[in-house]
Image (spheres, rainbow, N blue to C red):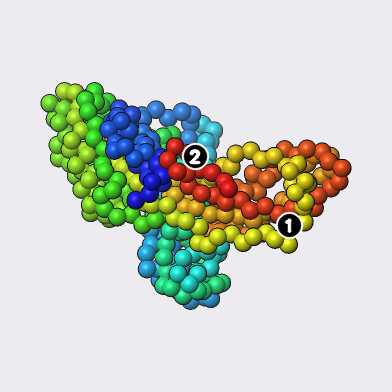
Amino acid sequence: MSRRAGLAGCLALFAVAGVGDLEAAAQSAAPGDGTAPLLTITGQVPGELGEGFLVERSAEAFCGGRPVEPLRREILAPRIFSEAPRPPGAPPAAAPAALAPDVLTFAIDGEGRPLSISRSVRSDGLVVISGGPDMDVQAAFASWRFPRRALSDCEFIVHSRRVRLGDAAPAQVAHALVSGDNRRLAPAIRRALSRPGDACETPPRLESAAAPNRRRGRTAPGGRDWAAVRFDIDETGTTRAIEPLASSGDDEWDAEVARAVAETTFGAGPRRGCIVGFSRAGDDLPAPFPPPEVGELNRCSAEQRARLKLDRLTYPEAFSKRAIEGWAIVRFSLASWGAVGGVEVLEAQPASAFGEAAARLIRSGSVEPGPDHAAGCVDRVIFRMPDEGERPNVD
């Protein structure tokens, strides 16, 4: 397993229907490997939002116009959205159930790994509550594997279907919850997951919390496993009727999550229909191959390049959560009066997200004025997961 903690080896937790105290306790009860909770769903919604929707997603891959079946795939997480706020009395905005597909372009290397993943930009009038879907799709797709044959001219097509949150399958809602921050739609999410007779909005006091051991089961490098369960709490504070709600399909991990819930105890007070879930990332997934030396591409002298001072790198969050590493080659110019210009990403692997982050890093740098204009500067920006105690870094 990875030595790297907090990101590469994180446990994430969500709690719905009022088991909020479990969030803080789970971190202290977790094994000493950098585990950390993700979010808790509470009952308050700040601001006014439109109706909640869930967007189901499926995907298929083509190279040269022909279907390509993966050897390993990860089901894309549904996303939860809301309509933009509307004036009182205004009718809901009409929207088709089927949304325009997202298309990512990519290639496959000789090991069957996706390369050069580049996202498309989609605008369908919805306010994103749970994070940018395009970036999450890039990161999830980067962990897929295809047969070991180099292919080019490939497309990854993501089909999306919008359903009202109340009509969505509970397993789809649970998957969306584990995969994103949906606090603003908590009441609607709770209603979508509830059953007649459920009563777990106000939790009893948490006495002790257990956390699943992330080393149980197998998660592919760059992948994520998750599981959600329903449970009741009896008069003594003991969890009862633990029932799998949905999961990514790792039986050992599912059993470990159920064990952790069974060993968690609360203060006296019966509750019914509580829901909690955990997710974990696999080992670090290194970049597909080392970045090339800039060599003759770089036309800046060492003295000119030294005028540019960079801030700390911001690692693409969706890739950081999955411990996926990458790099980018960026070209830029330095004006004599002290400004960065002409920023251009020459190559980024395994996905364009690393190029976008590298370009932002260069643009945000400060430049000392100099005697001349420096054109054609080229830098390598290498994203690596941290050793224990570090933050994600750039070489």
- In percent of the image, x 46 and y 28: which residue is there? 46
Is mark 1 in CB contact (under 8 Å) with mark 2? no
Q: Distance of mark 1 from mark 2, alpha carbons? A: 29 Å
Q: Residue 137 at what x, y percent from top left?
A: 47, 54
- In percent of the image, x 23 and y 54: which residue is there? 251
Q: Image height check: is 288 above or below 179?
A: below
Q: Image height check: is 339 above or below 322?
A: above
Q: Is residue 103 visible?
A: no
In this picture, residue 269 sits left or right of residue 314: left
Q: Within 10 angstroms of label 2, few (less than 14), some, or many (20 or more) residues?
A: some
- Closer to the camera in the image, 300 or 348: 300
- In percent of the image, x 41 and y 34: which residue is there? 183
Kindly identify the amino acid type of the residue bearing the numbered disc 2: Arg
- Read off the residue under disc 2: 391
Q: In terms of image quadrants, where is residue 71?
A: bottom left
Q: Residue 135 at what x, y percent from top left?
A: 51, 51
Q: Residue 156 at what x, y percent from top left?
A: 49, 64
Residue lying at the far right in this picture: please name it.
371
Kindly identify the amino acid type of the residue bearing the numbered disc 1: Asn
- Read off the residue under disc 1: 298
Where disc 1 sits, the SS reads loop
Sequence order check, earlier mark of 1 and 2: 1
Q: Residue 15 at what x, y percent from top left?
A: 31, 35
